[in-house]
Amino acid sequence: GDVNEERATRHVEKLHKECSKGYLQSFKEDKVVDWLLSGPPAENELIAQIYEKHHDKSLKSALEAKCGKKFFLALSALLLPPEEFLAMRMEQAMKGWGTDSNVLVRILGGLDHASKPSMCQVRDAYQRKYTRTLKDALRSELSGNFLKASIAWIDALDDPSQHLEVVTNVDVATTADGDLDQLIDDLLTEHESVDKMMASIDAQEIYNCIHGWGTSDTKLIELLCSRSKPHLQKIATAYYEQRDKPLLARLRSETSGWYKLFMTYLVESPEDADVRQLDAAMDGLGADAVGLIEFLVGRSNARVRAAKEKWEGKHDAPLVDRIRSELHGSNETLALELLKGERDESGKADERLAVNQAEQLNAAVSRWGGTDDSTFIQILAKNSPAQNRAIRTAYENKYNKSLESLIDRVSNKNLKKCLQALLLPPADYYAMRIRQAFVGLGTSDKVVCRVLGGSDKPDALAIAAAYKRKYGTVLKDGIQKECSGKYKRVAQAWVTLPDALEDPEAPIELPDEIDEEEDKEQPSSSDDEPEPAPAAPPPPAAVPVYQPPPPGTFQVVVPSNAGPGSQLIVRAPTGQQMTVIVPQGVGPGMPFAVPMPAAPVAQAQPAPARDSPGSSGKDKKDHK
């Protein structure tokens, strides 16, 4: 029935009179029950409020002083909303020393989506009352199969798509226009529920692959490489909920070498993989300008902004300042422009604008060979790939030569590579980077791992298609030739297997496992990147044998805080001070030879062997 305030007020006075009785007076339990059961549950909440307002004391404490423990517990159930009472009972069962498992079994086992209260209502009430989730509370108190069963039961009843199958199993053609929006919402809810269920199943299957003695690499590769990156993130979430351990950490502990690095890029979220690439490009001595631009050129604006936010959150520093400290000149200008994430992504080309921009680029190169790099950057770095291709065509038609030949006039080698990359669609550029990684002595496996492993499933398939279109060979065959072991299999699978959730009927054909020498796929310890970011390029494999400096020179060792291009003030064996510049390719702790300075000019009067201030100043001038 409805809440009756007048009746509630009368019951408050009766309850107060009963609770005020002395020790020798009889407390009428049956009357208290009648008064609390005479109205709806909401009226009992009103009774408790009025009692506290009139008597400056809670009804709960007044009853507790007069009742036995079990009877007070029963009365508490009448004073609280049902979901809050059950939440309170579970908290009491987990509070203090030990856990009352029987109470938890009775409550959890008695709740479902149709019970009153429902599991969702009790879960929400628990979080509202105790500021932590019910699942977190259970994880802190339970273990083993009891914990797994409890969490699984909560998740099953937490499914928002319960009973939606009846609603969504309709003919869209006969659905009224006003009901279509709700039908679409229900279908999306069902899809999300199925997606979550698949992620949970996949997480369990991954655990089966890596649990116990050895790893079932074939099943593991087949599962991971037939899923998209967004779904892999859902699998990682489900795995953590099931095992309370990060999926990536477990996979890294089960793999090694380039196989481990590829898996790391594959399973990481796109922004985490991008942060790893940024750190690899900027950590150590000097910055890898091509590595930075490789990230900035091929990623969408949204992904660049997400990676920037992730990097800054991790390092508590602005990424723009770090790039400014690592790059200089036109490389810095280009990187900062791309970092804004404002590149046109419309995919449309303006032919008239392309002609005008082609003329501007041509004018940016002087007849004496100098170039205005800023013009190239401002035009090519802001345009979409489609617009840059239109400029390319317009330039060829007007000047009878390629736009690439014009960019070749740019003096900065790295900037030249990056500007030429901006003329290509992302898939074509990454296909070119993979091709370059295969050319020459050995394979640049780091490039293969970060380009292919860091790309989402549709992007990896697009790179494979671009590779075949550009070079007339299949990327899978190139990987077969240049890579080895499990690393080869996972790379081949990622660029060939379809997304099984998008196309369930497509066959999953994993490359055959071939016994190979494992040392082929083992990078050096510096190549196998430390957590959380890849290491700097590996040092030379052989330790150089000490060679005495050539005649007429003396040896200087580079201190730990200096590097190529640094200026050092050193003292020659003759005692003279001189300023020298560290040559390129010489790092901290490495020696280099310096020509012996000319003998100091003799003084008119005898002087000590060490330099006087005057002679020292002259020597400095001689060697500037």
Image (cartoon, grey):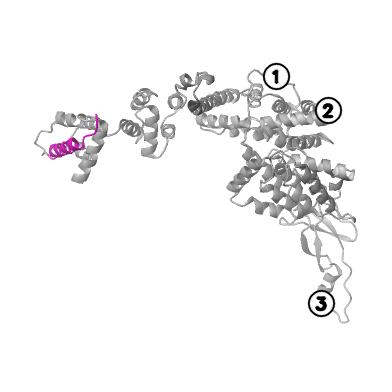
Q: Give the image location of residue 215, x and y in percent.
A: 63, 24
Secondary structure at badge 3 equals helix
Split into 4 quadrants, where in the image is the N terminus? top left
Q: Which residue is mark 3?
A: 614
* Residue 21 as seen in the image, left or right of residue 279: left
Hey, what amino acid is under mark 2?
Gly
Provide the residue span drawn in magenta.
Answer: 1-20
Residue 541 visible to the viewer: no
Q: Which mark is residue 509?
A: 1
Q: Which residue is mark 2?
A: 472
Please tell me whether residue 528 belongs to the stretch shown in magenta: no
Q: Measure the C-alpha gap from mark 2 to mark 1.
A: 22 Å
Q: Which mark is residue 390?
A: none
Residue 6 visible to the viewer: yes
Estimate how packed mark 1 is, as few (under 14), some (14 to 19) or many (20 or more) residues with alpha carbons within 10 Å: few
| Contact, mark 2 vs mark 3 (Cβ under 8 Å) | no
